[in-house]
Amino acid sequence: MKTTTFLTFVGDQCGRAEEAIHFYTSNFPNSEIKSIIKYAEGEAGGTPTLVKYGVFTLDGVEYRISENNYNHAWSMTPGVSLFVDCDSEQEIQTLFEVLSSDGGQVMIPLDNYSSDNYGFGKQFGWCQDKYGISWQLNLLDL
């Protein structure tokens, strides 16, 4: 058995899945786009410009993505986030800045370890990117 994170872009985010794939793979090391399949003309759920199904990796971890134009009563939630253990202060600062900028949101500011920031590692921050995906970034206390 294998579990994989699946991101579904609906509502206001529908039409941004391919942009997100390129954004993520260009900002994480050891990342690649494995496949992007678009809807066929007239196919239910989308148009030929939308991603029916995509697969990409971030630092070697596989993610799947899709978008559709159905009227769903849900979208992304910060209750589910992607947790990233970073190897250096430069890496965590760069990723936090990139992910929280350009329409993103800082949920817990990136700060050095203290008793009020959960204490997962040496440095921790939580943000939401411009696509509504929530990220927890942690600098391992090596």
Image (spheres, rainbow, N blue to C red):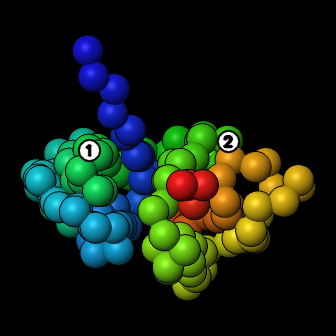
Query: In percent of the image, x 37 and y 40: which residue is there?
Result: 6
Q: Which residue corresponds to the image point at 55% horizontal and 74% vertical from the top-left?
A: 89
The residue under the point 68% across, 47% down is 120
What is the x, y in percent for residue 105? 68, 72
Q: Does residue 11 appear anywhere in the picture?
A: no
Quadrant into which the C terminus falls: bottom right
Closer-to-camera residue (98/123) = 123
Q: Quadrant of the N terminus?
A: top left
From what the image shows, is residue 44 above or below residue 94? above
Q: Nearer the viewer, residue 59 or 68?
A: 59
Of the numbered discs 2 and 1, the one sitting upstream in the chain is 1
Is disc 1 surrounded by few (<14), some (14 to 19) or many (20+) residues within 10 Å?
A: some
Position of 45 with respect to 41 (left or right) is: right
Residue placed under numbered mark 2 in the picture: 79
Residue 123 visible in rendering: yes
Would residue 116 appear left or right of 86 to someone viewing this image?
right
- Under mark 2, the amino acid is Gly
Residue 42 in the image: state x and y as whole percent. Answer: 15, 50
Q: Residue furthest bottom?
A: 102
Asked if the residues shown at circle 2 and circle 1 are in contact, with their CB atoms under 8 angstroms apart, the answer is no
Q: Mark 1 — residue?
A: 62
